[in-house]
Each structure stands twice: as C-alpha cells, then as structure tokens.
Amino acid sequence: MTGDADLLQLCAELVDIPSVSHDEDRLVTHLEARLRQVPWLEVVRVANSLVARTALGRPQRLILAGHTDTVPANGNAGARIEGDTLWGLGSADMKGGLALALHLARTVDEPAVDMTYVFYECEEVDTRFNGLRRLLADRPDLLVGDAAVLAEPTDAVVEAGCQGSVRVAVRLAGVRAHAARPWMGRNAVHRLGPVLTRLASYEERRPVLNGCTFRESLQAVGLSAGVAGNVVPDRAELTISHRFAPDRSVAEALDHVRTVVGDVLEDGDAFELLDAAEAAQPALDHPLLAALVAGSGRPPRAKLGWTDVAFFSAAGIPATNFGPGDPTLAHTAQERVERSSLEAAFSSLHRLVVDGAGAG
C-alpha cells in the first residue's frame, strides 16, 4: 500500500455512514468536507453528487468514478472488522472503491494526468435518478475526460466493457372456458410451452472482444397468468430478459429475441419492449486503460452485467470497471471486502494516477 492510511479502516468509516439510495446526504457531506481540505482540488457539489478535480494542464484527464448509494440493509448495517476482513453493507459495492478514490484524491498532488474524482448518487435505483445523468444535464463540463475507471467491485481485476440488456413481455391470448369443458376454449398458459422450451434449450453466444469472453443469456424472469381455479385462462404474459454482448446494439438484441420466440405469436398476441440499456465495448486499446491492465498484473475479463461504464461509453469516453471487493457478494447479507483486495486495487490505481499511460 502507498501512503500511511489503513484502507480497511477508511472503508469501515464509510460503511458506518448509512447511504441507502435517496438518503446519501450524510455520506456526501462527509466526503465533501474531506475533499475541500485539499488545496489542489476544485470541489463542486450538484445535489448529492460530488466532483473533485485537478487543473494542472496535463495532456490527458482520467475520471475515477464511484456511486455513493447502497441497497437496503439485510442484517448487515454497520461495519465489522474481523482480522483482515471488513463486513458490512456497501463494503464491496462500493465503499471500498470510494475509499480508494478518496485516499488518492487527498494524497496525490502531482498526478501524471489531470484527475476528476466523481462520487455520484442513486446508481442502485431507476436510471432517472442516477447522479451521472444529472451531472450530464446540469454540468456536462464536469464529466469531460479522455478515459474513465468505474470503481465497481472486480476484486482488482479489470472487467472490461459491460453487457447490454433488453427486457420484453410476450403476451399470448387464449379463449376462456370452464375448466370442466376445456375443449370449448384455448388455454393461453399451455401456449407458453414452445416459448419456454426454446428458452430452456437456448445456446448462448460467447463472443470474444478485446480478448474478453462475453457470455450472453436469454431467460424467463416473470410469469403472469390465470383467472380462477375453474377457468381456462385466456391470457398469459411471460417476461424475458436478454443480456447481450457489446458487439450488438439494443435494436439487434431485440431482433434476436423476436427471432427466437416470434413465430409463436399470432394475431391478438403482443411482443413489447419493457426496458433496454446499451452495452459498452471493452475499449482496452486506450493507453490509460491498457496501462491499468498491465499494471494490475492479471488478465482482463468481460463484465457480465450492466454498469455505468455504458454511460461513459455513450458519452464517447472509453471506460472500464476496476475496484476492490468480490462482485458476487454485492447485495448479499455476506457482503465483505478483504484488506488484500483493497491494497491490490489501490496499488494499481495509484500507479496509473502517478505514472499515467506509462504505468504498465
């Protein structure tokens, strides 16, 4: 570890400040007070999002971003340190990343690149509340950069890009009848059989992009049907989630889902897009992100899931996921972060900030 801070203790201090989505003021005020003490930073607060940046005239600017909110507690509110393990809500997702960004911002006064540290609100809820969107609308100048690192938990491994997502509703019609005389109707639930069979036997694509293998999925995630226990149902609605690799657009992904299930649809049925999010390319050919990969000493992997890397990608800023903590523990009662993960991630980020593209 670089510097004299105990990163595990610093993370614990942040975990002990509750910041469930929409209730982040106390944590952001704490971060703001710490950052306004730093003479080489300009600090701007927009609602409950905070931006601290240098203005040293460097030829490149790197954005290091992390969200301040957590999901609701699950019997794990407050920090608990046992040896070299910190337990508690947000320890992995993503107060570990916030702790690293805070320490870097307060200790590195001569970075090789100009730095923009972004601590933003409401990532864990509907995107209309997302602090990055508000910053883009109100102060787009604060989000200018050549590359970005999103401090999502990756256990100090670069997780490149992110998957896109589409969620659709397939509504199948039938004809009501008495359950004792089903031949007089048509069972809409039974019509789901071919659709469910196709989803259960679906063979996902695994495209390799920038050396990272993305694994797609097509899953039934919701079902609504039935009228009464003695009625043949005349409607059935299936919700389908498709996570797709960044070599496809939302439109292409939606067409793919339609190809898989569309020939089951008849007049009176419906196929409706419920929500969608574009994917993000890995972008590891950018010198700063390539240096982060090299400096981490570990091969990158694909991000299987959606993150705000897609926000930066859509804004034309190459970005990647990199931070401490096991991502599979996020949102669980067992959420925790190890000292070794914090220190490994900090070492790589510190090298990148201090050495820039030469960090590799």
Image (cartoon, helix red, strand yellow):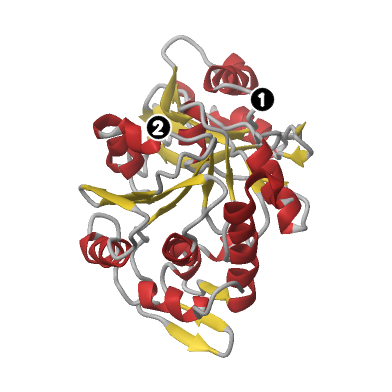
Q: Which mark is residue 247?
A: 1
Residue 258 x, y percent position in the rendering: 57, 19
Sooner in the amino-acid sequence: mark 1 or mark 2 = 2
Disc 2 marks which residue? 233
Density class for disc 1 (Cα within 10 Å; few <14, some 14-19, many ≥20) is some
Q: Nearer the viewer, residue 16 or 28?
A: 28
Which residue sits at x=34%, y=77%? Answer: 16
Density class for disc 2 (Cα within 10 Å; few <14, some 14-19, many ≥20) is many
Residue 321 x, y percent position in the rendering: 58, 48
| Whether label 1 touches label 2, CB < 8 Å | no
Q: Is residue 124 above or below residue 255?
A: below
Which residue sits at x=58%, y=65%? Answer: 346
The CA span between labels 1 and 2 is 40 Å
Which residue sits at x=46%, y=27%? Answer: 315
Residue type (three-letter) at the residue carrying disc 1: Asp
From the viewer's perspective, tell me whether residue 242 is left or right of residue 80: right
Q: Secondary structure at mark 2?
A: loop
Locate the N terminus and report the quarter of the image it occupies. Answer: bottom right
Q: Nearer the viewer, residue 312 or 106?
A: 106
Q: Nearer the viewer, residue 347 or 186?
A: 347
Q: Is residue 296 above or below residue 300?
A: below
To which quarter of the image does residue 228 belong?
top left
Residue 225 x, y percent position in the rendering: 40, 37
Q: Is residue 325 visible in the rendered structure shown here?
A: yes
Residue reaching furthest to the top: 267
